Amino acid sequence: QVQLVESGGGLVQAGGSLRLSCAASGRTFSAYDMGWFRQAPGKERESVAAITWSGIITYYADSVKGRFTISRDDAKNTVYLQMNSLKPEDTAVYYCAAKKPYMAYDYWGQGTQVTVSS
């Protein structure tokens, strides 16, 4: 069982930066692939970034490539999403999620709101 708690959301002006954190419980965090998702009002949830259990492979949605960076610190059981050059269209609730390799995401955090003003 993995419990995830996101933090770091807030209100920022366009062009600004935020760093989201996702703290995970449990002793096997390093065995999980981690991902960040977001859901804007009236839209479906979309994948933003992901990182494998090893930290070697990362994935980014085209809309955030070059602006967002996902990283993990297994010693702290935490995954991060550094968001730079934020745009109003990045406004959404951001969720982190965990999964075992080759499986679907089955652990989700409660979400943190990110609002980017123009």
Image (cartoon, helix red, strand yellow):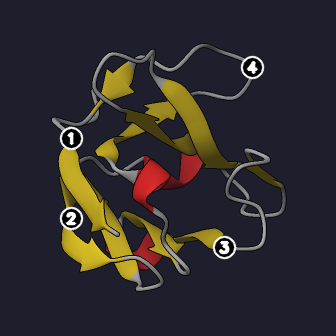
Question: Neighbour class for label 1 at 10 Å: few (<14), some, many (≥20)?
Answer: many
Question: Neighbour class for label 3 at 10 Å: few (<14), some, many (≥20)?
Answer: few
The location of residue 8, given as percent across then percent down, is 21, 70
Residue identifier under label 1: 111
Nearest to N terminus: mark 4 or mark 1: 4
Residue identifier under label 3: 67
Residue at horizontal 63 percent and vertical 71 percent from the top = 69
Taking 67 as reference, is 95 left or right?
Answer: left
Nearest to N terminus: mark 2 or mark 1: 2
Q: Please tell me whether mark 4 sits on a helix, a strand or a loop.
A: loop
Residue at horizontal 42 percent and vertical 16 percent from the top = 106
Q: Please tell me whether mark 3 sits on a helix, a strand or a loop.
A: loop
Give the residue type at disc 1. Gly
The location of residue 3, given as percent across then percent down, is 20, 38
Residue 97 visible in the snapshot: yes
Report the front residue among 92 and 109. Answer: 92
**Circles 4, 3 touching at the beta carbon (< 8 Å):** no
Residue at horizontal 72 percent and vertical 63 percent from the top = 55
- Residue 102's tag is 4
**Circles 2, 3 touching at the beta carbon (< 8 Å):** no
Toward the bottom, the furthest residue is: 16
Taking 38 as reference, is 84 left or right?
Answer: right
**Circles 4, 1 touching at the beta carbon (< 8 Å):** no
Give the residue type at disc 2. Gly
Q: CA distance from mark 4 to mark 3?
A: 27 Å
- Residue 9's tag is 2
The location of residue 92, given as percent across then percent down, is 32, 43
Q: Please tell me whether mark 1 sits on a helix, a strand or a loop.
A: loop
Residue at horizontal 28 percent and vertical 67 percent from the top = 117
Give the residue type at disc 3. Arg
Q: Is residue 95 above or below residue 86?
A: above
